[in-house]
Image (cartoon, grey):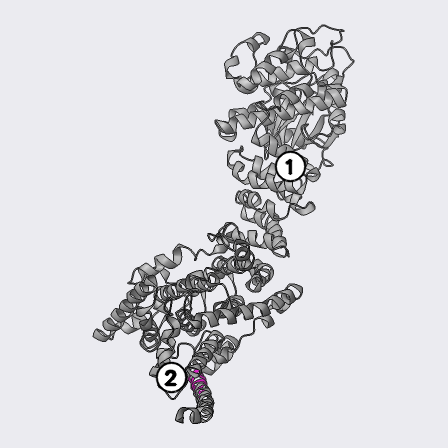
Amino acid sequence: MWSLFSRDPTKDFPYEIGEVVDGLDGKSIWTLYRAKKKGASGSDDVSVFVFDIKSGGETQLEIARNAVKRLKTLRHPSILTYVDSLETDKVIYLATERVEPLHSRLLKKIDIGEGVKKELYFSWGIFQITRALSFLNNDGNLRHNNVNLYSVFVNEESGEWKLGCVEYMTTVDTPYTLLPHTLQSYSPPEVRENAKPTSKCSVDMWGLGCLVWESFNGPLGQRANLKGMEQRIPKQLLTVFRELTSTNADGRPNPADVIARCRSNGGFFKNDLVDALLFLEEIQMKEKGEKGRFFSQLAGQLDSFPEGVGRYKILPQLLAAFEFGDAGSAVLPPLLQLGNQLPDAEYQRRVVPCVVKLFASNDRATRLRLLQQLDRFVSHLQPSTINDAIFPQVARGFLDTNPAVREQTIKSVVHLAPKLDYNNLNLETLRYFAKLQASDEQGGIRTNTTVCLGKIAQHLHPQIRQKVLVGAFIRGTRDPFPPARSASVSALAITQQYYLLQEVANRILPSLCPLTTDSDKSVRDNAFRTIRGFLSKLERVSEDPGLRESMEADVNTATPSLSNAAATWAGWAVTTMTAKFYRSQSDTPKSSNPHNTSRILLNKPASLEQASSSQSSASTTATTSSATSMTSLDHDHDHDSQHTGHTHSDCDWDWDADNWGDMEQQPSSNTTTSTSTMSPPVNTPKQNDHWTSLEEEPEEEAAESTDKNNEGSESGWDDQEFQVVDDFHSIEQSGITGTNNKFEEARKKREERKLARQRQMEAKRAAKLRSTAPAKKV
């Protein structure tokens, strides 16, 4: 074969001829070859029809030239697409889109499918050929004259049927065209030489009937076979088929009528595939509401569509609708579903730019839908894309005024954490988490912040992890919202391999013991299990000190060892933390409370703090301060949406003011106060009656307790000052000695602040006693 073409002067033809494509079986004057553009990497594959001038006569040469001329001037989605052509003294080259004969495609049953997929495949294919004939007969006043199994080709990618073999095409008012002997079985029975058809579409409608029969039964051997084997033709199409193959030429319908009848309810062309593809072709003329309904239904229909249609036909239409239309985030579910069929390189080129563009949207609904669908496409995103283009946009949601956006933003970190760089994960994310856990007014958001921190602990830098986790989770155990306290206990258990034993004894166990008297049963149960686990760990090391090294092996390692934790006593916590996030009201469409529904949905869709609304005054104080903090966040969010490059400044936090978790230095009175704050009793009775006989008034004690609660709610995570976040590199250079010095300085500062507060309180008490002394004497 190659020697045949090497002698021809085809250097100007920009395509390199490849192997022969079978399937025409001598029914055409052309030989079909695969080809690719010279110098291309493989994305410009085409098909080339070759006519050998020497082996054909003058009549066939004119027929071949007529085919090139006709195909060059015809442009229709259901007609074979012309690409290029070349005529030499030896051959004629006709390059088209990459196709294969329909006869060859029907032999590949795996590409067609079975059942519903097969029926959809034939309905869309026959519809396309009928539409092409309607265009030729009614709009172009042309007659194809050669419609059959061998004149239809299939696009190798999308699977669409294309009408080709236009070499015998004439105008509608010319006499019958006599076909070669090999094609005589496709000639209508009324054909006579030099006679004109009785209607402009009767010849092509007979050919369409032959095509329908061959689609379900195989090649047509002779004309008489059309009356047999009708049982394989679908019932919706059987009546139309009999009209198409009627011996009465005037009784054959117009192709436009065939489309109208088969597109009616119950017709062969009325199905999800044809409806979807026709909608996409006209999507620019559709209303926005129609587009939204269509895209919401499309995702559930894609699995029933034939192979290739979604990737090569529907996906390009979706991308165009997003790029040039107003489809917005509604296109995301079907787009991501079809994107999973793409190779990674093509996914990066076609889908990722759409995702990045959607993340930059200011529309809350768009951002919320992206965050909810993140797990479906995050595996395809490169770390550089996430850190440079996506995370800065995601971070805006941490301070969003809408609780649903804040909550989904927190959950998204679980999927993004493995690909975030040091700065975005260990600095920026933890800053936002500290503010959310301390001051967010929604109990569900505070709970999920703790859950997320436990899930991403394995990805944090060891030194950052050692400084952050204990302080964060101990602060969570003092949350007035019971699920938040329970989540903190579970988080301590699941991350137990990251704590030094000295830290367990001095900080963790003292903070867990008060929870054994918590008002919530689930919190008490988790606390008991976690305490028993930590105690057994300490007891084992006490019996065998050599185990200390193995039990603290993960403290300073960056290798995730979540599976090791699951195999220990904390396995129950692993199940709890890895199962799901806390389900807040923002996850449900309606509130279960029939009263004040609109207020809950608008103001607190993510809050479930009704469960703790009847708790002590400390809970009320914390909620009030949280609401005040959220009012200031509204301004931060507005400023952040205009200056996204300054998100770091919006999240500055007073880490030096942190005083949580310093269990080993607190006196017993402070511990008692913390316990009452951490475990607020339900329906606490009034307890101020017995204070009248004491020297100190109850108002002073309440003020002191409130001050301590407010101090805690405004603090960061680490009870040893979270300077490691800002000065991490300097700590690495100074080493352990420098770190210990900083810890000592921090302790001294805290002691000085405590003494100052005690002096202030004593001065207030003394003034109070002086003012009330005369009254008491009387």
Q: Position of residue 368 (x, y in %)?
A: 56, 54
Q: How many other residues sit within 10 Å of disc 1, few (<14), some (14-19) or many (≥20)? A: many
520 relative to 166 in the view: left or right: left
Q: Quadrant of the N terminus?
A: top right
Residue 555 showing in the rendered view: no
Q: Which mark is residue 280?
A: 1
Residue 770 showing in the rendered view: yes
Quadrant housing residue 296: top right
Q: Which mark is residue 692?
A: 2
Foreground of the two, 142 or 323: 323
Task: Give above or below for 601 relative to 636.
Answer: above
**Magenta part of the chain:** 739-748
Q: Nearer the viewer, mark 1 or mark 2?
A: 2
Mark 1 element type: helix
Q: Compute the Cα span from label 1 to label 2.
A: 79 Å
43 relative to 462 in the view: left or right: right
Q: Position of residue 390 (x, y in %)?
A: 58, 59
Overall secondary structure of the magenta stretch? helix
Q: In the image, what residue type sits under mark 2?
A: Thr
Q: Residue furthest left?
A: 543
